[in-house]
């Protein structure tokens, strides 16, 4: 009971960011209350930064559910996140998590079993469309299919560096790499050219939407193709994607890895 | 093709946080490269903040998988996160996401169907153990079951304010609230006393671990109880928990909401 007298002496208050909270009457408030928060936080710019960081977390955990547009107050936040070191850092840690899992998973799967596979999405996973979004509002402008398709046809998207490193490491471990993208079959040539341009040298399969897949949600289309891939004798141990719709649905990979993307949502 | 000349004129590089990257030869680098990052970021404290924020995201997205301890370099980061406005803000946005889903879900479920239910975990979901962790290193010290059980017996944990607000709103909408906790049946009296102390006035059921549940993972135990709950005529539309093990497994809620918790992991 040593710790309790101190604890119980405190008037405890967890302050919701935008709501009032009890004031701390003890010598030290355990959690900051609204009155403790520096005035700057309640001013516009810092309040936006606080909210937008929480909004981003809600997107990345899929708490947000389907969404159509970045909140207007978060446009500058998303730009700063993507242009600054945080996007690169978040991507690098996701890749490190993936690699930490991969070698153990391969050992656990054992020899003679199904061929061990890793599924990668393409856009914002292997390839970065940051150069496109940099001149199109970092996701704050309405999606323009015509200009995005021109960007895809140009086949000049760079690799997300941490993904390229992971990709090579997984191939080195013996994984079969399956690319599963929402891009259409009509974009196969430009997608292959772009992957090679970005440094991805080989893959087991590149799966694109066929005409019969048009109109399916990504969850349905991608789940069907994971099922078909496993039916062909692969065991999908890992799956990397920037959308939850890359990752959920049956069958799921043994472990799924959510790459950051605060710019857009695909159901 | 209007945007492409500018884009293609740039030497593009996405810089992994800790690895070298190509330098920007164009007039404006789309994504910050390592050489653009202020020197401060590569110094200890800021590098830790950048890494620890990415580590926290990897925990919240479950990319990190099972983990036993906060990285040593992130102890101060977790303390600052919990004591500052970010934890409260992240919790509040998760609650707002939950409420945004809830009213529509109830309408979609329709009248005459199974009783609409919302499942809540207890610790770090309805109740905050922040006062305990504040004097126990915010999760950076090894878990001490004896002292934590004393804290539970004292029944003085405050409500997480945004959860209490959500709880009342959901009950107002007509949800049956099911509490599903990893606490044991021996802790029923103190748990009920604490919930009432914190402001939670009523619930449909409070489910605790029975002796036969000891040794089961949280995923197994909680999935079994969700299945039993649905067999009793409830339809679990929403589920709120600070651990993925509160949320995953079959049956799952229609929508699950991950509350933040960078202090500990339960499988």
Image: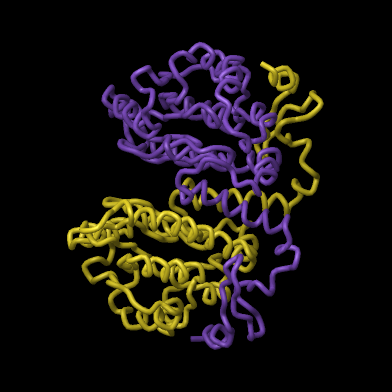
Chain colours: A yellow, B purple
Report the residue at 57% width, 20% height from top. B146
Report the residue at 28% width, 63% height from top. A215
Report the residue at 38% width, 32% height from top. B217
Residue A134 visible, this angle: yes
Relative to B63, say whether B242 is above or below: above
Residue A112, horizontal then vertical, whole percent:
21, 58
Q: How many marks?
A: 0
Residue B127, horizontal then vertical, whole percent:
57, 26
Residue B177 visible, this angle: no
Say left or right for A189 vs A25.
left
Say left or right for A238 vs B141.
left
Front residue of this view, candidates B225 and B135: B135
Say left or right for A98 vs B81.
left
Residue A108, horizontal then vertical, whole percent:
32, 51
The residue most toward the top is B189
Res A246 quadrant in image:
bottom left
Res B85 quadrant in image:
top right
Front residue of this view, candidates B187 and A32: B187
Report the residue at 29% width, 58% height from top. A236
Res A204 quadrant in image:
bottom left
């Amino acid at each position: 009971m040593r710790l309790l007298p101190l604890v119980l002496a405190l008037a405890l208050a967890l302050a919701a960011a935008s709501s009032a909270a009890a004031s701390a009457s003890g010598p030290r408030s355990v959690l900051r209350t609204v009155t403790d928060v520096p005035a700057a936080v309640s001013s516009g710019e810092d309040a936006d930064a606080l909210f937008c960081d929480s909004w981003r977390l809600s997107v990345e955990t899929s708490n947000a559910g389907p969404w159509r547009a970045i909140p207007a107050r978060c446009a500058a936040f998303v730009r700063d996140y993507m242009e600054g070191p945080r996007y690169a850092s978040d991507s690098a840690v996701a890749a490190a998590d993936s690699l930490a899992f991969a070698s153990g998973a391969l050992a656990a799967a054992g020899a003679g079993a199904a061929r061990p596979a890793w599924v990668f999405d393409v856009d914002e996973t292997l390839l970065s469309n940051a150069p496109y979004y940099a001149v199109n509002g970092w996701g704050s402008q309405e999606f323009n299919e015509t200009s995005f398709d021109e960007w895809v046809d140009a086949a000049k998207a760079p690799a997300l560096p941490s993904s390229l490193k992971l990709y090579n490491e997984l191939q080195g471990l013996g994984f079969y790499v399956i690319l599963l993208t929402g891009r259409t079959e009509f974009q196969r040539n430009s997608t292959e050219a772009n992957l090679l341009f970005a440094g991805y040298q080989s893959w087991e399969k590149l799966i694109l939407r066929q005409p019969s897949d048009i109109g399916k949600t990504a969850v349905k289309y991608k789940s069907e193709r994971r099922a078909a891939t496993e039916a062909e004798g692969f065991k999908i141990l890992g799956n990397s994607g920037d959308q939850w719709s890359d990752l959920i649905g049956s069958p799921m990979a043994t472990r799924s890895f959510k790459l950051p993307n605060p710019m857009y949502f695909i159901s």
